[in-house]
Amino acid sequence: MAYQVIARKFRPRSFDEFVGQAHVKQTLLNAMSSDRFPHAILFTGPRGTGKTTTARIVAKTLLCENPQNNNPCNKCQSCLDVAEGRHLDVIEIDGASNNGVDQIRELRETVGYMPSSGKYKVYIIDEVHMLSTSAFNALLKTLEEPPEHVIFMFATTEVQKIPATILSRCQRFDFRNHTLNDIADHLKNICKQEGINSEDAALFLIAKQAKGSIRDSLTLLEQIISFSGKNITLQAVMDILGLTDRHLLLSTIKAIANKDKSQMFEATESFKSSGYDPTLFAEELLELWRNALMVKMDCHKQGPMDIGDNEIEELQTIVSNMGEEDIHLLFDVTLSGLQRLGYSHDPMLALEMLLFKLLSMPRLQQGLPIATAPVAKPTAARATTVPQKKTATRPPTQKVDDNIASAPIPVPNEPVEKTWVQFVHLVKEANGFLGALLEHTFIHKEDDKVVQLGLPEKMSFLLDKLQEAKNIERTQTFLKNFWNDSRTIEIEVISTKQLGDNLSPKAQEEQARKTKHQKEAETIEAHPLVKAAEEAFGDQLTRVKVTNPTNMENH
């Protein structure tokens, strides 16, 4: 007998052997037991989740000579014929290759004939969404009022392409992706039957790569068996699938968590020498940050996670000195870096720099500043040039550990607004949305308890967003981490008349841009070539549009 691949050899033959989709199985079994089986059914869902297999099991059950608890016996001639695809009353049609109106007309002609044996004639149309509009229209009347002995079962992965007139005539069953545990258990059972030794971690990784598809997992298992023989190991799975070593990934985030430059250097060198795909590595790193956050929030205690127990224990150790906000920030920066990898001429170099950027990022939860602000030493010269402003006395700084104390922090008595532009810039790097809101504000008033931010009247539409509880809380967190300042944030709309010389960082940026443009325009107007052109044409330059600002002295 010719060799059968695992996906065909272990295809479920009854509902008892079927993996997952309990909601579909129970509904179909109840319909058959109560003799209320519909004449038209639509199975929809991702690939490899059992749609066509379910249709064949239903067909076998309906035509079985000795059904057992609404399951086919798989022993009678009818069951054997359906399993081998030769039953005269089970017509399976590929919608992709028989999608024309002529094929549907031929189908309509055969519908009227009685079944050769048994009670029903079953039509299974796979990939039904591939039928043409004319073919669907030709099927409408027959589908709405078929003969009593006819049952239609459709399967599709793209239900949105099926006309509403067809959908309204069918009972719809939505198949879901299988869980990792269901797939891993199924693979373990198959390996046991095939006499193959397998590591649980290896099967779990195969299940993960299948992305919810039983068929995909069996195809991968077949390939790995061909590679590693009767002994499936985690390393063999990673080698054949080109995946990043989990130990390397965990070592990378451990280096980031501990700020260990030496360990990070070793990890990057190992990564480069192994020839892993930088984009794939970044994607897996993103997923690992997600898992780290779940572990930090103790989600693994609420129910099973999609990772092994050993990895959960390692992640618990790694994130012990990190906060949830830290992990959120690291995830965001990794995601931004991943998006830029596709545009880099050297993705490996871009990934290496991304990893060291993650390593250098300070910890919000440990009270470290978002980034180090330049510290100006209080000299006498500085005291005479900086206008003094009456400021409220700051509360005494609490004792911090050596790492925090060594981080440069602005002088506590220094007025806040003097570095507000820099503060907003650093917030924008950490949280782009919040930074984009704050760049339209300025320090309006401050006292012992409150820092009042001013918002120009023309930007008042941003007030509701700025005053959202989560944004106020995040702003106060950044303020505390940057200046060790625990005062409350308030925001007030300031009318144009009251603005005076107060400018938000955005307004200052716009003002600087206009000044720069004006200087460039003056430089161009004074250029000898422009003067010569004005004299030659007897006219004057009326407008300057700078499209690529350059130093005119270089031309």
Image (spheres, rainbow, N blue to C red):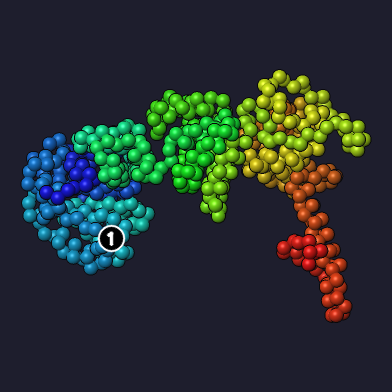
- Residue 493 appears in view: no
* Residue identifier under label 1: 96
Which one is in front, 493 or 201? 201
Side of 502 where 231 appears, left or right: left
Q: In this view, does 141 lie to the left or right of 379?
A: left
Q: Would you say residue 61 is visible in this rendering?
A: yes
Task: Farthest residue to the top: give it.
Answer: 399
Q: Quadrant of residue 16?
A: top left
Q: Residue 386 placed where, x, y %?
A: 89, 37
Vertical comparison of 20 with 111: above or below: above
| Image quadrant in which the C terminus is located | bottom right
Q: How crowded is the residue under tag 1: few (<14 C-alpha within 10 Å), some, or many (20+)?
A: some
The residue sitting at 71% across, 27% down in the picture is: 406
How many numbered marks are there? 1
Look at 44% across and 25% down and name the residue there: 313
Q: Measured from the top left, where is residue 456 in percent x and y?
A: 76, 45
Q: Quadrant of residue 128?
A: bottom left
Vertical order, 170 against 180 (above or below): below
Q: Residue at the location (29% across, 36% down)?
A: 232
User: Does dot 1 land on a helix, a strand or a loop?
Assistant: loop
